Image: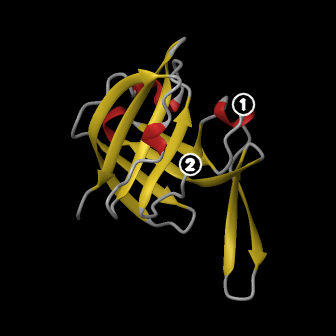
Amino acid sequence: TIPENTTTSEATEESKNEIEYYQGYEVAGHLKIPKYKIDAPIFKSMNMQTLNISVGVAYGTLNEVGNTTIFGHGYENYPFSVLGNIKIGDKVIITDSNKKEITYEVYDKQVISNNDASYMLRDTAGAREITMQTGHSDSKRLIVSAKEVSK
């Protein structure tokens, strides 16, 4: 059985932060792709254990200016199994650990070589962007890029 989410509170000098855990791993936020009914935790650290449960932050900080890269498996019943079907214009909602929710819109989708990591370090010209990455084949990866949309 899957354990329920748990939270703990850690007092700091300036504020009281709640840290959320899912199956024993710290959660950085949540990913929603409404069109495909995806609602999944985003783990703060990315490793084989967390990727076997959901998705994780590989580079950057959720909902901050710049590009944040999120990795996940594209296997059936995993959150990124929908990336192959996602379309330009689809919405992705990221809620960070501070409960700030930002809606992003997909603007690019491409298959690249496993050797290419340039998509993680790209200049966003001061915008908030996310890049979702999953495997495509033995030597390729599927990259889906989305940028913040105004409310």
Q: Specify whether 82 is left or right of 40.
A: left
Judging depth in this view, the residue of 93 and 6 nearest the camera is 93
The percent coordinates of residue 49 (x first, y second) are 74, 33
Q: In the image, what residue occupies the spot 40% across and 26% down? A: 82
Q: Is residue 28 above or below residue 76?
A: below
User: Which mark is drawn over residue 48?
Assistant: 1
What type is the residue that disc 2 sits on? Tyr
The quarter in which the N terminus is drawn is top right
Asked which quadrant contains residue 109, the reply is top left
Asked which quadrant contains residue 106, the reply is top left
Q: Label 1's element?
A: helix
Q: Specify whether 150 is left or right of 11.
A: left
What type is the residue that disc 1 sits on? Met
Q: Specify whether 106 is left or right of 116.
A: left
The percent coordinates of residue 86 (x first, y second) are 31, 29
In the image, farthest residue toward the bottom: 13
The percent coordinates of residue 131 (x first, y second) are 42, 42
Asked which quadrant contains residue 118, the reply is top left
Lower position in the chain sequence, tag 2 or tag 1: 1
Q: Label 2's element?
A: strand
Q: Is residue 37 above or below residue 94?
A: above
Q: Disc 2 marks which residue?
A: 59
How many angstroms separate mark 2 from mark 1 (CA)? Answer: 16 Å
Q: In this view, does 4 lie above or below 82?
A: below
